[in-house]
Amino acid sequence: MTTVYQAQDAAHHVHPFTDTAQLNQKGSRVITRAEGVYIYDEAGHKILDGMAGLWCVGVGYGRDEIVDAVAAQMRELPYYNAFFQTTHPPAAILAERLARLAPQQMNHVFFTGSGSDANDTVVRMVRHYWASQGQPDKQVIISRKNAYHGSTMAGASLGGMGAMHGQGGLPIPNIVHINQPYWYGEGGTQDPNEFGLARARELETKILELGVEKVAAFIGEPIQGAGGVVIPPASYWSEIQRICDKYQILLIADEVITGFGRTGEWFASQYYGIKPDLMPLAKGLTSGYLPMGAVLISDRVFDVIANHGEFYHGYTYSAHPAACAAALSVLDILEREQLVTRVKNDIGPYMQERWLKLAEHPLVGQARMVGLIGGLELSPNKAQREPFKVERGTVGLIGRENSFANGLVMRHVGDTMIISPPLTISYREVDELINKAQKTLDDTYQKAATLGYLD
Ligand SMILES: *Cc1c(COP(=O)(O)O)cnc(C)c1O
């Protein structure tokens, strides 16, 4: 039965990243409210949101104090811009506070409306940085295949999603991609750390191939999120840092997902011990309560761009006062409830222990998790890490549908199941999540067996 919302939606709402014809055959799931780690649909189903929305709702749903802070700000000053030499209190306070939380070398911030915008800013800032120093040919940004950096022209170009590049003539010029550090899928019989080093060294090979005088920067997500929660081997990031240092190219850590406690540190750059020059942020910054992104800027980059005249770049909603107020309120909660340390020392280790045990399931080739971000590789032959013989993502999609039916939002990327719950999740809710994931694996195993996908 189609509800009124579903009918309106099907008639007029074009969804992001969606096969519209396919969706409209069955109708959208209508989510009407949320509280804590749970969302509720129109039919009244209570679903544990194992994805924190789209990786963003770190502090959980139903936080009146964020709502109140935003309402108060909107009564005081709902909008003013930061162009033309003006600012407002929430922008100034948030900039100072982010600089304090950020890694030591980062003391400045540029505000954007989203993570994609932040990556557009990054592309322009990086090129402006080199041009300002008389090296306008240093334009190339090296990224990785299967990276996700957003969906604007620059974001999708930086990203390494072939399907996205196939639509709209991407990537834009001077963005190139090397291989990702995805040991489970691409590491074969190599030792993970050997593999991690080899993949990092592709950066050096690429720099030498292009000529260092052409290369501006390297960009990577510390842990690839949308690409399937690819956690790189321990050897990877230190080698990337070494290569960036050696050739003096900028290091960009896209922390849109990994920022604000997801890994048990404020930023995953701290988890991996790297020192980025630019750090795009979004998602957890406002916990999704309002849209906002930002780029944290190192002193090295700031000192150049701040002293070379006007940077012709900005968004109407850069440093939107209400979004700043939401971010400040989220930071209050993260600090007061010590959610980052909680992920590192308390709920994180508990969830990791339970999640990693799912690897014992006959359908699971690997379970991995850092902080509260994890993945499960589904395989018909776990010992060999074999893919299914049906089209990639077929079994993963069955898994996602089963998960929803079991009252758990768990996404799939290909045949990898992924999870990224609110940082506030309780022990009891972790148990519930694991039990539902377990049942989902059982159901998916059954269905895959029935369809002959396990042969
Ligand atoms: C989600 C995401 C983006 C894009 O952010 P939007 O707010 O959707 O534009 C960029 N980078 C990473 C790593 C992301 O996960």
Image: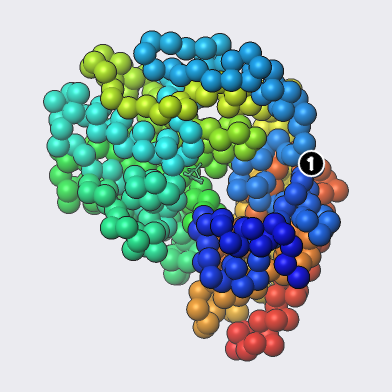
Residue drawn at x 59%, y 67% is 23
Q: Is residue 271 among the parts visible in the rendering?
A: no
Residue drawn at x 53%, y 62% is 18
In this rendering, the answer to whether 407 lies above or below 371 is below
Q: Which residue is mark 1?
A: 36
Q: Could you say where residue 7 lies in the image, as x and y percent from the top left?
A: 66, 62
In-front residue for pair 254/239: 254
Residue drawn at x 17%, y 51% is 209
Rendering quarter of residue 434: bottom right
Amino acid carrying label 1: it is: Gly
Q: Could you say where residue 200 lies in the image, as x and y percent from the top left?
A: 36, 50
Q: Is residue 215 among the parts visible in the rendering?
A: yes
In the figure, is residue 91 to the left or right of 110? right
In the figure, is residue 301 to the left or right of 328? left
Rendering quarter of residue 443: bottom right
Q: Quadrant of the C terminus?
A: bottom right
Q: Could you say where residue 212 lies in the image, as x and y percent from the top left?
A: 18, 40
Give the tally of numbered discs: 1
In this rendering, the answer to whether 64 lies above or below 206 is above
Disc 1 residue crowd, few under 14, some 14–19, many 20+, Cα 10 Å = some
